């Protein structure tokens, strides 16, 4: 009886052992999978850290580039505003240097012409009465641009004087082109600072150039012969130029110097 019982029970006794070994196998597979995950996780974390660091560096570089671009553009805008405010003084100084260098009757004639050119611009502004692009900056009319008109009168005077003294050659041609480019830049500043429209500046530059050509033609064609031949013509030209320059000096002190003082004080 015991032998028969043992034969019947023994298969059931072996089954738990098989079940335990199967559970152990599953545990080993699970532990191996967990070990594999833990083993690969540092690489994943390292990749995530590297990606985040790259993104942070990219954002940092973009911020630095934006800061550099912004600072350079603000510096350029500040330089343009400063040169625009100094343009009338620079043009007057350049004209004065050329006048002192030549110190002849034609230079006197050119000085009187520059002041009459400015007066022509003032008269045309009142006649045309065209508003500026931003009327809150200045309330007076903007057509034509008096700055551009004075600049190109002076530019033409400088080029004509240089060609008369040194002739037309490669050097004078290059210098003339450079003077013309500088005059164009200072005229463009009136547009960039919103004091004038492009058409107002172009018309002013064309008037200044045309009036300068006309004024020099008038000297060569009519006035020069009379200036040499008649004393009274010389007296009229000299005294007239002196009176015009004195009037312009009063205008400069009243509207340029005092205006600058009122801005700062």
Image: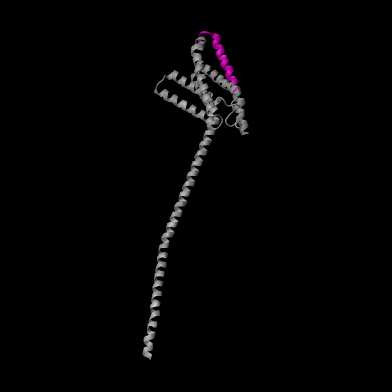
Q: Is residue 229 above or below residue 245?
A: above
Could you say which is closer to the camera, residue 125 or residue 111? 125
**Residue that protrudes farthest toward the top in the picture:** 229
Q: Nearer the viewer, residue 250 or 3?
A: 3
As drawn, is 97 to the left or to the right of 246? Answer: left
For residue 120: magenta? no
- Magenta region, main secondary structure: helix
Residue range (magenta): 228-250
Q: Please give the name of the residue rendered at 51% of the width and 41% of the height, measured from the top-left corner.
A: 71
Would residue 238 be counted in the magenta stretch?
yes
Instruction: Give the image's coloring scheme.
Output: one colour
Q: Relative to 111, is 25 on the left or the right?
A: left
Image location of residue 262, percent across then percent down: 63, 31
Residue 261, given in percent of the width and then of the height, sits at: 61, 31
Q: Position of residue 250 (x, y in %)?
A: 61, 22
Q: Quadrant of the N terminus?
A: bottom left
Question: For the view shown, which residue lies furthest in the bottom direction?
Answer: 1
User: Quarter holding the C terminus?
Assistant: top right
Which residue appears at 39% of the width and 82% of the height? 12
Name which quarter of the figure residue 135 lies in. Answer: top right
Report x, y in % for residue 56.
Answer: 47, 51
Q: Is residue 93 visible?
A: no
Q: Residue at position x 54%, y 10% from top?
A: 233
The reply to whether residue 102 is visible in this rendering is yes
Q: Relative to the observer, which residue lies in front, 154 or 239? A: 154
**Compared to 11, does 33 lie above or below?**
above
Res 36 quadrant in image: bottom left
- Identified at 49% across, 12% down, the residue is 221
């Amino acid at each position: 009886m015991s032998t028969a019982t043992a034969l019947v029970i023994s298969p059931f006794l072996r089954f738990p052992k098989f079940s335990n070994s199967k559970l152990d196998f599953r545990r080993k597979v699970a532990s191996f999978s967990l070990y594999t995950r833990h083993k690969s996780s540092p690489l994943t974390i390292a990749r995530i850290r590297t990606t985040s660091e790259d993104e942070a560096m990219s954002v940092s570089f973009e911020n630095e580039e934006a800061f550099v671009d912004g600072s350079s553009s603000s510096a350029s805008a500040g330089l343009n505003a400063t040169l625009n405010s100094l343009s009338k003084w620079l043009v007057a100084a350049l004209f004065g240097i050329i006048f002192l260098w030549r110190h002849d009757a034609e230079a006197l004639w050119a000085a009187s012409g520059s002041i009459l050119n400015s007066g022509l611009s003032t008269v045309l502004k009142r006649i045309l009465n065209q508003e500026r692009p931003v009327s809150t900056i200045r309330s007076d009319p903007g057509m034509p641009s008096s700055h551009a008109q004075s600049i190109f009168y002076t530019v033409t005077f400088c080029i004509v004087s240089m060609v008369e003294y040194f002739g037309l050659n490669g050097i004078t041609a290059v210098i003339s082109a450079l003077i013309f480019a500088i005059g164009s830049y200072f005229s463009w500043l009136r547009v960039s600072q919103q004091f004038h429209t492009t058409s107002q500046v172009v018309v002013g530059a064309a008037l200044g150039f045309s009036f300068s050509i006309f004024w020099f033609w008038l000297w060569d064609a009519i006035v020069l012969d009379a200036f040499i031949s008649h004393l009274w013509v010389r007296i009229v030209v000299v005294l007239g130029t002196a009176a015009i320059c004195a009037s312009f000096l009063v205008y400069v002190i009243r509207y340029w110097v005092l205006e600058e003082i009122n801005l700062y004080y």
